[in-house]
Amino acid sequence: MEYWLKEAHTKGTEFNIKIERHLCSVTSKIQRIEIVDSTDFGRVLIIDGLLMHTEKDGFIYHEMMVHPAMAVNPNIKNVLVVGVGNAGIVSELVKYKKIETIKIVENDENLVTLVKKFFPANAAALGDKRVSIEICDDMKFMRRAGPEYDLIILDIPDPFGPGENYFTKEYYGNCYTALRDDGILINQHENCFYEEDRPACQKAHKNSVKVFDISRVYQASIPTYPSGHWLFGFSSKKFHPRKDVDKDAWKALSVKTRYYNANLHIGAFSLPTYVEEVLWEVE
């Protein structure tokens, strides 16, 4: 008998991955976490029935959440990551020697435990002496956070149900307060290829534009994410993601990547016309 992971991207579009082995299923007070091995995409992390990460293409998401900000401001020292994910973002951050502290706030201890067990390559970064993890209500944490971070990365859920709270003007305002004067905020921004996903994408952009002096959207191709075309948000009090990028300085760091590079950086912020039109509607 064959087993398949089936994820509905729209009412008329479904994405399927063949499953070789079901590894675990844990239901906490917050969410349902499942981990499986797939035929073509390696190990897969599923939360509340939605595909969050695969070993095959997860590196694209992780690199694009980290390196664009580091290429714009290579002097980032203190980083806050909201959500442990599968520790892939932290595994990219620890590549930078100038970073002094990486604080992770995560509201589900079960996820941390499972990541350490089933994604050991990424989880190894959690043992870096600069990394600390606080299990807490990340919403409350952000409300009381002071201006101590150079970079905040929001590895947050999709904007449905409780996840909607991460895309509000209030939440972006809390992030703004937690950043230093030259701070950068990076968040996953959904996609706007499917019409029913556009409102969430527009909401994220509209609220970030209201709060930050500089707010831009950039892109990457991630095969297992809805539409395969994923968007990210870059918001800052000071730095412009295209004007202030120093490609030569970033290249000199010799950071090993598989997707991101200095030449791709500029292109990532050059959006297709249909995306620009969706964003212009709310600017």
Image: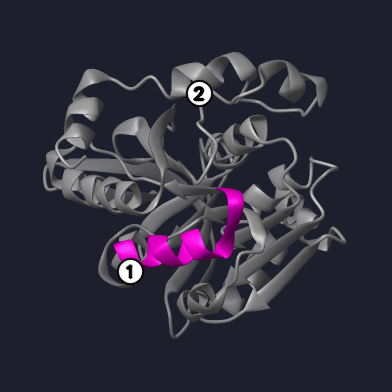
Give the residue pinned by disc 2: 242
Whichever of callouts 1 and 2 sits on the residue coming sooner in the sequence is 1
Q: Residue at x 33, y 42 (%)?
A: 16
Q: Between tags 1 and 2, which lies in front?
A: 2
Residue 241: where, in percent of width, then height? 51, 30
Quarter where residue 102 is shown:
bottom right
Which of the 4 image quadrants contains residue 214?
A: top left
Q: Is residue 8 above or below residue 252?
A: below
Q: For the residue marked with disc 1, what is the amino acid?
A: Asn
Question: Residue 106, image x and y in percent?
Answer: 57, 72
Picture residue at 21% right of the left edge, 39% below the top: 283
Q: Nearer the viewer, residue 37 or 223?
A: 223
* Residue where numbered disc 1 is placed: 165
Q: Which residues are magenta?
A: 168-183
Residue 34's place in the image compared with 120, above or below, is below
Decide whether residue 177 is among the magenta residues.
Answer: yes
Q: Residues within 10 Å of mark 1 (few under 14, many from 20)?
A: some
What type is the residue that disc 2 sits on? Arg
